[in-house]
Image (spheres, rainbow, N blue to C red):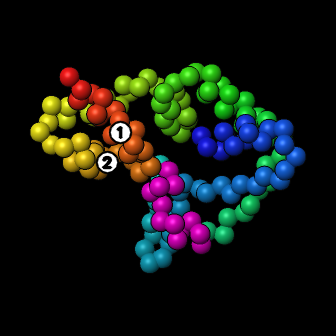
Amino acid sequence: MGFLWLCDQLKTVAVTVTQVKVPLDSACAAPTPVYQQFTGLGEMDPQQVLTGQLPEITVTLAQRQAYSCAWQSLATENAALRVALNGRTTSVPTDFLDTWFLPYVHSELSVDEVLGQLLEGFPPGMPTWWLYSRLTNLRKP
C-alpha cells in the first residue's frame, strides 16, 4: 500500500521513479531441491533479497497515475484497517481481527504478554502498535 500512496503523491511530478519487484517465491536446487513461497517481504531473509540480482524498472508517469487511482479508491473507502486477502489489498472493519483477541480480553496476562502470544500467530509485518491499541480498547470496561 505504501507504493500506491507514493505513486499518488508523485502522480504529477516530473521525477524518475524506479522499483524493484521482489518475487514472493523461489526455487533452489542445491544442496537439496526446495521451493519456497512467501506471503510478504517480512518472511524473507534480507540477504536472500539482496543477492537476487533483481532488475530495476522505471515507473512511468502514466503508471504512477494508474497506481494513484488504486490508492484513491482505497482512501475513499475510509476504513481504519486494510489487509491483503488472497494477494489483494482490501478495506475491512476495525473489528476484523477481533476473533484472535477475544480469548485474551479477560486474561490475567499483561497486554505485552498477550501481544507476544498473538504475534506468534500473525504473519510478519503486522503493526504491533495497532494490535496494542485494539487489545487495550477491547479490555476497557
Q: Residue at x 79, y 49 (%)?
A: 59
For the residues bearing labels 1 and 2, Cβ distance under 8 angstroms? yes
Instruction: Indicate yes or no whether the magenta region holds residue 41.
Output: yes
- Under circle 1, the secondary element is helix
The residue beneath circle 2 is 119
Left or right: where does residue 105 sit relative to residue 136?
left
Residue type at the position of mark 2: Leu
Q: Residue at x 59, y 40 (%)?
A: 1
Secondary structure that dominates the magenta span: helix
Q: Which mark is residue 117?
A: none
Q: Residue at x 34, y 32 (%)?
A: 134
Residue type at the position of mark 1: Leu
- Expressed as whole percent of the image width and height from the top left, the position of residue 54 reads 67, 64
Q: From what the image shows, is residue 104 above or below residue 73?
A: below
Q: How many marks?
A: 2
Q: Residue at x 53, y 61 (%)?
A: 26
> How far is the residue under mark 1 from the one under mark 2?
9 Å
Q: From what the image shows, is residue 116 above or below residue 73?
A: below
> For mark 2, does the 10 Å Cα neighbourhood hold few (<14), some (14 to 19), or many (20 or more) residues?
some
Task: Assign the C terminus to one quadrant of the image.
Answer: top left
- Expressed as whole percent of the image width and height from the top left, the position of residue 83 reads 48, 35
Query: Do we see residue 99 in this rendering?
Result: no
Q: Which mark is residue 131?
A: 1
- Expressed as whole percent of the image width and height from the top left, the position of residue 29 reads 50, 72
Image quadrant in which you'd find residue 19: bottom right
Q: Residue furthest front?
A: 141
Region of the chain picked out in magenta, as a range = 40-51
Left or right: where does residue 13 sit relative to residue 44?
right
